[in-house]
Image (cartoon, helix red, strand yellow):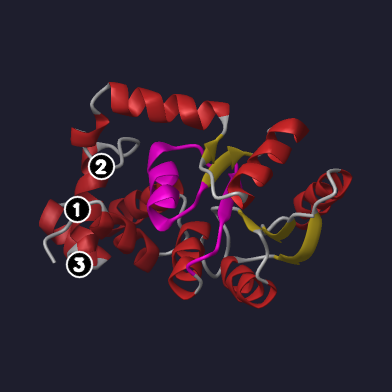
Amino acid sequence: MTSVVLVDDHPVFRRGLRALLEELDVEVLGEAGDGQEGLDLALRARPDVVLMDIQMPELDGVEATRRLLAQWAGAKVLVLTMVADDSAVFAAIQAGALGYLLKGSGLEEIDRAVSAVAAGQAVYGAEVASRLRAFFTAGGGAAQPFPELTEREREVLALMADGLNNTEISRRLFLSDKTVRNRVSTIFAKLGVRDRPTAIVRAREAGLGSR
């Protein structure tokens, strides 16, 4: 029997997913409501698969995946999330996730994905696979990082990656403090992160910033 840990900040979704998995004869070893709790639980329980959301408090799913694999090289993570933008998909894959499904996937698709990831195989939902194909077919390897951001938002993110605070960014770009705050909030939302340090890590991993 395949064993899993559920990491998602929505209790109702976790309950529903748990019921579906139990129908598939999958053993749920435990649940966590945020990334840090999920990291701790996965390290204790050592499941065959960790089902990980992306947007969560305390620690987002990408960073939780990265830290989990740093501490347990044998961990196998299947992302199950509503976040479908390219940057989130690539960040999760770069962090070490073996699979990426969108919430709303059918029971059979979830069953196949859990089994595949447990066996060490990479698996992506149909929509995610389509986005990956489009990215590489279009020569995405040379594309600007974070294509969902506007040029100005990318500029703000690069300055954040350089260590500038909002006031310094507003002076550099000749923008009001309020405008910069709004831009930063929009960047967080588009990247699927909840705090500045995580956004900076993502930016530097993508090559933004000079530090």
Question: Crowding at label 1, few (<14), some or many (≥20) Cα neighbours within 10 Å?
Answer: some
CA distance for labels 1 and 3 = 16 Å
Secondary structure of the residue carrying tag 2 is loop
Residue at the spot 60% in from the left edge and 75% down from the top edge: 43
Depth check, mark 1 against mark 3: the one in front is 1
Q: Which mark is residue 164?
A: 3
- Is 89 or 56 nearer to us in this picture? 89
Displayed quadrant of residue 134: top left
Closer to the chain start, of discs 1 and 3, is 3
Residue 176 appears in view? no
Residues at circles 1 and 2 in contact by the CB criterion of under 8 Å: yes
Q: Is residue 22 above or below residue 66?
A: above
Quote the CA–CA distance across marks 1 and 2: 8 Å
Is residue 77 highlighted in magenta?
yes
Q: Is residue 160 left or right of residue 45?
A: left
From mark 2 to mark 3, how far is it between C-alphas? 20 Å
Q: Quadrant of residue 3?
A: bottom right
Kindly tell me whether residue 86 is visible in this rendering. yes
Local crowd at mark 2 within 10 Å, few (<14), some, or many (≥20)? Answer: some
Type of amino acid at the residue the image marks with label 3: Leu
**Disc 2 residue type (three-letter):** Pro
Mark 1 or mark 2: name the one nearer the start of the chain.
2
- Write the start and end of the magenta stretch as one range: 73-98
- Near-viewer residue (116 or 108): 116
Which mark is on residue 145?
2
